[in-house]
Amino acid sequence: MAVAHAANDYRLGAQAVADGVYVFSGRNEHFTRDNGGNIVNTGFIVGTDAVIVIDTGPSLQYGEQQRKAIAAITRVPVRQVYVTHQHPDHYLGDAAYADASIAALPATISAIQTQGNALADNLYRLVGGWMAGTQSQSPTSTATPGVVEIGGRKLRLIGTAGHTAGDLMVYDEASRTLFAGDLVFHDRAPTTPNADLLQWLNALDQIRQIDFKVLVPGHGAVVRDASAIEQTRDYLQWLSTSLHTAAEQGRDMVEVMNQPLPERFQKLAVHDEEYRRSVSHLYPAIELTTLPRR
Ligand SMILES: [Zn+2]
């Protein structure tokens, strides 16, 4: 017999990264009709009587398939979902968890309430049928930074900003695993549509101080050292400096978009498209606040 749902199967396989901690790794690509939006890392933590899910992926179908893949590993029910931030690839699977608490930072909740439908519509255009039945919905509760205990797992919720106005990280004390959300990218160019680069660099300083053994970036392979933090910092620092320098030199946006990236960033997945997007997001404001030296 043919396998059902083969057309829209994300083929999610959980990878154990620590004791009771699992990650679903997405591809280091842009949204396409081939990947169905599965370009993101999500994960879960298994406690004694509760599973905690971190991000639910780009669509309802992803959320449902994620839930099935979790059930294949443990009979413990999902009771808590944390949404790291407002970007649609991280939370549009929330509807698969209608019976769980879904929490996010206040800034994330308000961004989802005001921009969520537009972001979901945009994903429909990019990935098509994979989005069937998907609707943006607001998280059901507010995540309060600090230590919480769920299912016997002590979690530290860390509220920061920079990638967006609200970036939630989840740190599991027992395994010292840090789910860093999109504050950390690995071998993939960071996205900046809602970024504040200075805040983001400050957040990376904060992440450096965290005593983690495993770091799960929002995009790219899981790491056990600071390399992905340093890579993200290096790229953002370069981006900020080069955009400010270009504005001081009075260069126009097209010229800035066409400048070649340093060689060390050319190995980052989708660097070309993301760099151009970043210039279009960030350069106009930088130009406005910079007096050209001419
Ligand atoms: Zn993001």
Image: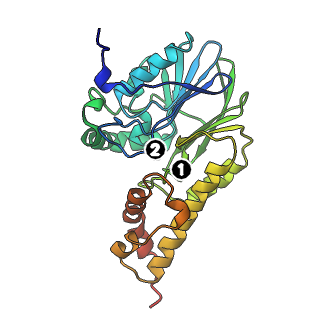
Residue placed at 67% from the left, 55% from the top?
A: 205
Q: Is residue 242 above or below residue 81?
A: below
Amino acid under disc 2: Asn
- The quarter of the image holding the C terminus is bottom left
Q: Are marks 1 and 2 in contact (CB under 8 Å)?
A: yes
Pick whichever of labels 1 and 2 is earlier in the sequence: 2
Disc 2: CA contacts within 10 A as few (<14), some (14-19) or many (>=20):
many
- Find residue 259 and report its horizontal and vertical position in percent: 42, 72
Q: Is residue 16 left or right of residue 42?
A: right
Residue under label 2: 28
- What is the x, y in percent for residue 8? 31, 26
Q: Residue at x 72, y 31 (%)?
A: 173
Relative to residue 277, is residue 121 drawn left or right? left
Residue type beneath disc 1: Asp
Q: Helix or strand or loop: what does disc 1 sit on?
A: loop
- Residue at the disc numbered 1: 187
